Image (cartoon, grey):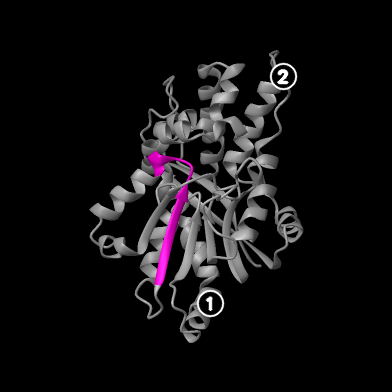
Amino acid sequence: MEKAFTNANWSAHAKAYSSVFSTLTARWAVDSLQIAHHEILKKLQQHEAKSSGTPFHFLDVGCGPGVLSFEFARRYLTAPTEISITASDLSEGMLQQLTDKLKEDPTLSPFTPKFTTLQCDGMVLEEIADGSVDAIGSNFGLGIFPNRTKGWKTAHRVLKEDGLLIVTTWSDKSSQMIWFDKITDMFNATEGEGKPLEPPSLVAGTDKKRILKELQEAGFKDVKTFSTTHTIVFDDPKMMIQANMNNPFTTKFLERLTKEQMEQTLTELMEQDAQENFYQEGAKTDSADPFADGQPRLIPFIGFTVVARK
């Protein structure tokens, strides 16, 4: 799956990702900053008390279209402490989505001078100096990178002593992890070249004990995990299916499975989860299109917010 992490792949997917997934991932961006709020305030106050000549540096790793950076800006850029935000992503297309939003949204445009964008690999952060960052945030970035261990060590390197790490990552029990685990089983059961794939729940998902162990081994202390669940309303479930099909992660599966197989499987699994959140007496359809009823689909997703210090 690591081959899917390229500038070209994610830039091609940036617009679709922003339109479909931003409102979903934004729920955990809000959660993470609310959970870490008092620790962030403490760090800001400590920075202010030092009368430092440099701004408090917040680094967003794998920023995507910017939902975490924007939430941080709305909450903290009106504070008395001077703050700078570096929004970093491997994808130029994602950074362009962020830049456009920053210009077009009147609630965000006043913060533009505080923002810097950086196109780089979040597992390396070669342009970020050792010990130069006060707080790192990452909303489904570091937590789903193909080499998480490398990403954690890099985050530890660039943080100042006692610096704060705030990340979100998917639970291995979240709906989409279960969907793609089943698709992985189909892939591995189909003849083809190459090695079997590991379940996405192990690669891009995690559990509270595993994530704690990974961060402790990378040198972090005071690691705390918080689980939050959000049920997302999809007015257009077909768009959700297509966005998943266009995700760079999906490319690998298409080496052995057909597009039709994947779409049918995703549709069936999505419908199965959605039926847990919907009831209407006598509701049924004879249409071949499972979404012909025009009803929204409500799907639960589970994510972790992880807070740690260097």
Residue at the image point whose x is 66% and y is 28% from the top: 184
Q: Secondary structure at mark 1?
A: helix
Q: Is residue 19 visible?
A: yes
Q: Quadrant of the N terminus?
A: top right
Query: Which of disc 1 and disc 2 is earlier in sequence?
Result: 1
Q: Residue at x 70, y 55 (%)?
A: 211
Of residues 124 and 129, which is closer to you in this image? Answer: 129
Q: Secondary structure at mark 2?
A: helix
Q: Is residue 86 magenta?
A: yes
- Asked if residue 260 is positioned above or below residue 107 in the image, the reply reads above
| On-image quarter of the C terminus | bottom right
* Residue beneath the point at 36% across and 67% down: 74
Q: Is residue 26 left or right of residue 167?
A: left
Image check: 273 left or right of 100?
A: right
* Residue 1 as seen in the image, left or right of residue 282: right
- Residue behind mark 1: 43
Q: Which residue is mark 2?
A: 189
Can I make out residue 172 in this image? no
Q: Within the image, what quadrant is residue 18 found in? A: top left
Where in the figure is residue 36, as x and y percent of width and height? 55, 70
Find the magenta span and give its range. Answer: 83-94
Identity of the amino acid at label 2? Ala
- The amino acid at mark 1 is Lys
Crowd class of label 1 (few under 14; some 14 to 19; many from 20; radius 10 Å) = some
11 or 51, nearer to the observer: 51
* 10 Å crowding of disc 2: few (<14), some (14-19), many (20+): few
Find residue 62 and report its horizontal and vertical position in percent. 50, 49
